[in-house]
């Protein structure tokens, strides 16, 4: 299962074990079980504190074979179960589970760990993932940590490809899919703090109190994508006290798989680049406040004064200069059936959810680079792809169009307007597309719809602030990243900058950071600032 390089890396990681751990497997005579046996055997060979057993009973299996449990030998009441093989994107999750079970401390906020340990009641989590899903590891790791820190919490992490019948039977059409005590808990990526806020009614209040107690910043960046990270690094390196408040650090990077056009980097993946940015933020002493959604802005009344930002949990942060890098989100079609069948056939991430439609018929809506790339990727997995473009011609790069047209299981519909997504009440079963030239409607029978029609800036909360926005809701900026409000700058996909690209976002982030620096050195702090600090 593990090649020589992976075994060497695993051995290095397992050197961090502090106490013995047990791997207990419940297997059958399937090929997957044999692979599981090989994997656990190889893991046990890498360190004498790891033992592997293959005599697991029905309790260990939890109704699924192959399954295996990871637990600390001295405290077997705390365990996490993997059903199927956690390889691909989940191999890192497996390694972390081994380390945490073996006493290696997780790199997680101590307050969150205490919240996990303090939870009362019994929580039985089941979470389904796919090996190609780059959003799944965060959920797997959050639930793993919870199960290993609190004996009243169990987590079973299921590789959907191994248990296809169960995936079908439970109508799982998007991952990550998380269940609690047999009922649907959450569909999509969710962080540890978000899980705790759902389980612990006092979690939001605690987070708000902690945030509001922070001293005023000299620079506060709202948004943690490439633009926000670049802004913060530039101002921190100028010696200013800098903070980042992000709803989700990394932003769209977390949903981006292959990146091949970043100068100096031949290939990387969004989550990896996000991790690198996070480390750089930490190395520069920037105060990162993650999972913080800004809801209200009160601009300073005069130059050098304090801007105030209120967040969804009620916290308020103050800052002398503000950089808005709130990014953008996927645009919705806005047609009947889209909302009703979201995560029931309607999806936005082909990399995460594509494997769930293996051999089936799907549609991709959108003929730009994102849509055509999605259609090409899906064509390798699904039975048939219908690509629908609203315009008279595809807008993707020629090389992508040529690749798409070479595929035998792809149909291209141009000048087509999707007017409805249909279903049987439980899951999507088709869509209706209208020819924009002659008005004729056609029904396309399928089981999945992937929507790739561009982005909408995350600026709705800024509309009543006096900040100038374009007709598309973008923040209007000048060549220095400055807005029409003194001391407020903006960068990245939320602005009027023409091209929405990672490298462009980073550049505009640096520009906004330098703009904020110039503002701070030219404007003395007012009495209001002195009092707040």
Image: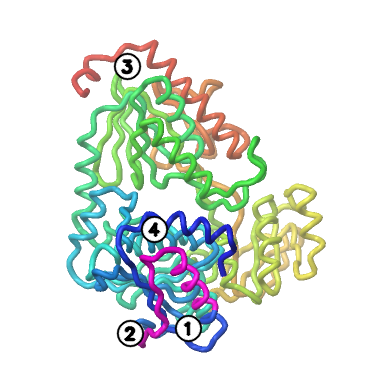
Using the numbered discs, state the Cα–Cα distance from disc 1 to disc 3 in whole angstroms. 60 Å
| 406 sits left or right of 220 in the view | right
Q: Check disc 2: other Cα within 10 Å, few if <14, some if 14-19, many if 20+.
A: few
Which of pointers 4 and 3 lies earlier in the amino acid sequence?
Answer: 4
Residue 229 seen in render: yes
Residue 337 seen in render: no
Dot 3 falls on a residue whose secondary structure is loop
Which disc is residue 59 wearing?
2
Which residue occupies the foreground of this view, 181 or 17?
A: 17
Dot 2 falls on a residue whose secondary structure is helix
Q: Check disc 1: other Cα within 10 Å, few if <14, some if 14-19, many if 20+.
A: few
The residue positioned 65% from the left and 35% from the top of the image is: 263
Of tags 3 and 2, the one toward the viewer is: 2
- Residue picked out by circle 4: 190
Residue 348 coordinates in the image, percent (x, y): 55, 59
Which disc is residue 169 wearing?
1
Indicate whether residue 262 is drawn in magenta: no
Residue 368 coordinates in the image, percent (x, y): 68, 50
């Amino acid at each position: 299962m593990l090649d020589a390089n992976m075994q060497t890396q695993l051995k290095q990681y397992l050197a961090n074990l502090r106490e013995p751990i047990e791997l207990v497997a419940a297997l059958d005579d399937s090929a997957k079980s044999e692979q599981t046996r090989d994997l656990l055997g190889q893991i046990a060979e890498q360190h004498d504190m790891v033992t592997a057993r293959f005599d697991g009973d029905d309790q260990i299996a939890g109704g699924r074979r192959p399954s295996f449990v990871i637990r600390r030998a001295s405290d077997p009441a705390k365990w996490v179960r993997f059903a199927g093989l956690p390889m691909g994107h989940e191999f890192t999750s497996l390694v972390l589970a081994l380390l945490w079970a073996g006493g290696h401390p997780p790199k997680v906020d101590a307050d969150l760990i205490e919240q996990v340990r303090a939870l009362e009641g019994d929580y039985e989590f089941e979470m389904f993932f796919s090996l190609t899903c780059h959003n799944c590891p965060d959920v797997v790791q959050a639930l793993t940590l919870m199960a290993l820190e609190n004996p009243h919490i169990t987590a079973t992490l299921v590789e959907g490809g191994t248990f296809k019948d169960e995936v079908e039977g439970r109508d799982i059409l998007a991952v990550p899919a998380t269940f609690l005590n047999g009922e649907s808990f959450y569909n999509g990526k969710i962080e540890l703090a978000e899980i705790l806020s759902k389980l612990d009614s006092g979690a939001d209040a605690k987070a708000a109190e902690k945030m509001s107690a922070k001293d005023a910043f000299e620079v506060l960046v709202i948004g943690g994508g490439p633009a926000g990270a670049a802004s913060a690094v530039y101002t921190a390196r100028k010696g200013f006290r800098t903070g980042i408040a992000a709803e989700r650090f990394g932003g769209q990077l977390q949903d981006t798989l292959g990146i091949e056009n970043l100068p100096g980097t031949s290939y990387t993946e969004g989550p990896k680049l996000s991790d690198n940015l996070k480390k750089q933020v930490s190395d520069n002493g920037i105060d990162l406040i993650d999972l913080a959604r800004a809801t209200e802005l009160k601009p300073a009344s005069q130059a050098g004064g304090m801007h105030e930002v209120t967040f969804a949990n009620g916290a308020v942060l103050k800052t002398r200069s503000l950089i808005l890098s709130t990014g953008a989100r996927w645009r919705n079609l806005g047609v009947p059936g889209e909302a009703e069948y979201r995560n029931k056939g309607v999806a936005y991430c082909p990399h995460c959810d594509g494997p769930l439609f293996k051999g089936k018929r799907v549609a991709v809506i959108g003929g730009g680079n994102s849509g055509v790339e999605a259609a090409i990727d899906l064509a390798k997995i699904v039975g048939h792809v219908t690509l629908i473009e609203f315009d008279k011609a595809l807008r993707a790069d020629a090389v992508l169009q040529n690749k798409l047209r070479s595929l035998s299981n792809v149909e291209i519909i141009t000048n087509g307007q999707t007017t409805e997504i249909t279903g049987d009440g439980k899951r999507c079963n088709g869509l209706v597309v209208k020819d924009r030239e002659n008005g004729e409607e056609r029904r396309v029978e399928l089981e999945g719809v992937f929507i790739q029609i561009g982005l909408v800036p995350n600026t709705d909360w800024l509309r009543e602030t006096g900040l100038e926005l374009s007709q598309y809701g973008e923040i209007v900026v000048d060549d220095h990243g400055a807005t029409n409000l003194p001391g407020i700058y903006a960068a990245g996909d939320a602005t009027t900058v023409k091209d929405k690209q990672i490298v462009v976002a980073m550049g505009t982030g640096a520009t906004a950071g330098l703009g904020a620096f110039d503002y701070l050195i030219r404007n003395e702090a007012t009495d209001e600032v002195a009092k707040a600090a």
